[in-house]
Image: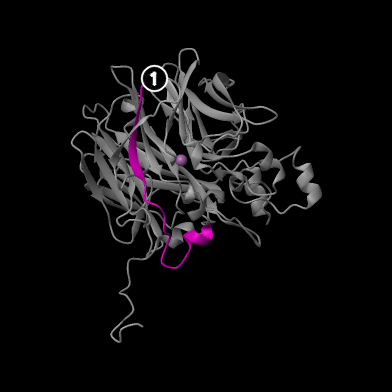
Amino acid sequence: MEPATARPKAPTAAPPTVGFSSLENEVQLDSIPLEGELPGWLEGSLLRTGPSKFEAGEQRFRHWFDGQAMLHRFGLSGGEGSVSYAGRFLETKAYAAASAGRIGYSEFATDPCRGLFKRMMSIFDPGISDNCNVNLTKLGERYIAMTETPIPVQFDGETLATVGVAYDVPGMLTTAHPHLERATGGMLNYAAKLGLRNEYRFFHLAPEPDARPEVVASMPVTHPAYMHSFGLSQRWLILAEFPFVVDPKRILLSGRPFIENFRWEPERGTRFTLFDRQDGTRVGPFTAEPFFCFHHLNAFDVEDGAVVIDMQTYEDASLIDQLYLDELRAPGGPRIPTPRVERITIDPGAPAGSLARRETLLDPGFELGRINYGRCNERPYRYAWGLTPSEPGGWLDTIGRADFEARRTTSWREPGSYPGEPVFVARPGAEGEDDGVLLSVVLDAAAERSFLLVLDASDLSELARAVAPHHIPFGFHGQFAH
Ligand code: CO
């Protein structure tokens, strides 16, 4: 029985629910209100993609990852002290169908309604979505939006106009987290070929617009794992297979949306395979207890030949279930597992089947973590920036800065505000690894507006904020382009 004095709890800060509601209007504004001062050297654009339309007529997309992609561009001029903003839908075939009032293509966790005949026909034409709402990259002079289907879409970095399919992925599944290949300015990515025989593949794509992907390493697999990113050290391409796996026949025949065909099979453990970047030969697998992760953070080789792999990890893949929109829009706000940052160390000379060493670097850890990529990717590093919850199990509401050398974290938080992925931009001529700014699109939930936050990356002090004319639904990833 409730005590007689029980009162409703004091209202807490507004939950982030509005971050999972559609933004339908496209705008282009030469200037938006700016508080504070941008560093004089900061010139360029923060380009982001993210889900922005969660309905198609009367039909509803089911999962955060299914919303139709809008591109966002914050143009920053430190010299002029101004910020511009533009938002524009990616003009995909999936978006065209959704605009016409129907879900036309298979998304991560939503399928179009299909009768038996259509389902059978879909084996020959699976109607895979081109909804590139996960990440984007600049390859040579081309801007490319990406998702995990094999249909990356090129767009104009200035106008955000859609250009068309960017290249042919050598497989049916891929990641929206390619790595830069420093030597060529090209791109390295992973794909899974599914069919009578399934294969994991790494491919390279040169920066020239007419280049075609070239497979540089591969490995046969029976039940492929769901992998959202991969690791890269100077010597190795790193595949971490979590025990969240699929019998590919199920994707075609089960009648269930894509991700609901995967099964958590903890007895498999997590398996690491290393592919030599010189010749594609592989060592491993090396094993670890079962865990799951979306995002590798960084990897590097150490002097004794070992490879160190830092990842943002979870006990299992249940986070995916908690990102259905019904869960995220629940009264009181979403509850999600809190990630850790873990360091895995592998001796490539050890026999296959050897246990990898696991060490916790941060607990609570980060999600959507970033590093000084241009300087530190594939190399030893000291700092990372990411999102973390202010209470265990809560939504990500805090920007954290980790100093792995001093084993110290610093944070930025404003109650009722929910930051997005913090993107590091180095100061031209910087000497220190953390000499630059962080850019994060933050939702002010009560005001139902988003703002671009500019922090000093070295201490998370606020330099400036620029207020968008509306809320920007929570997105995943973006890049700064000079
Ligand atoms: Co991602």
The answer to whether any part of residue 245 appears in the image is yes
Q: Secondary structure at mark 1?
A: loop
Q: Looking at the picture, how far across and down is residue 365, in whole percent?
A: 32, 45
Q: Residue at x 78, y 44 (%)?
A: 120
Q: Looking at the picture, how far across and down is residue 103, in whole percent?
A: 67, 52
Q: Residue at x 44, y 62 (%)?
A: 17
The answer to which of 353 and 191 lies nearer the viewer is 353
Q: Residue at x 60, y 39 (%)?
A: 246
Q: Is residue 343 magenta?
A: yes
The answer to whether any part of residue 38 appears in the image is no
Classify residue 37 as left or right of residue 196.
left
Q: Residues within 10 Å of mark 1 (few under 14, many from 20)?
A: some
Magenta span = 325-348
Q: Label 1, on which residue?
A: 350
Q: Residue furthest left?
A: 406
> Where does the N terminus fall, quadrant-wise?
bottom left
Q: Is residue 344 magenta?
A: yes
Q: Looking at the picture, how far across and down is residue 14, in whole percent?
A: 37, 66
Q: Residue furthest right?
A: 117
> Where does the C terminus fall, quadrant-wise?
top left
Classify residue 440 as left or right of residue 277.
left
The answer to which of 339 and 76 lies nearer the viewer is 339
Amino acid type of the residue that numbered disc 1 sits on in the rendered structure: Ala
Where residue 184 sits, quadrant-wise, is top left
Q: Looking at the picture, how far across and down is residue 23, in whole percent?
A: 51, 56
Q: Is mark 1 within 8 Å of ligand 1?
A: no
Q: As displayed, is residue 110 above or below residue 406?
A: below
Where residue 476 sits, quadrant-wise, is top left
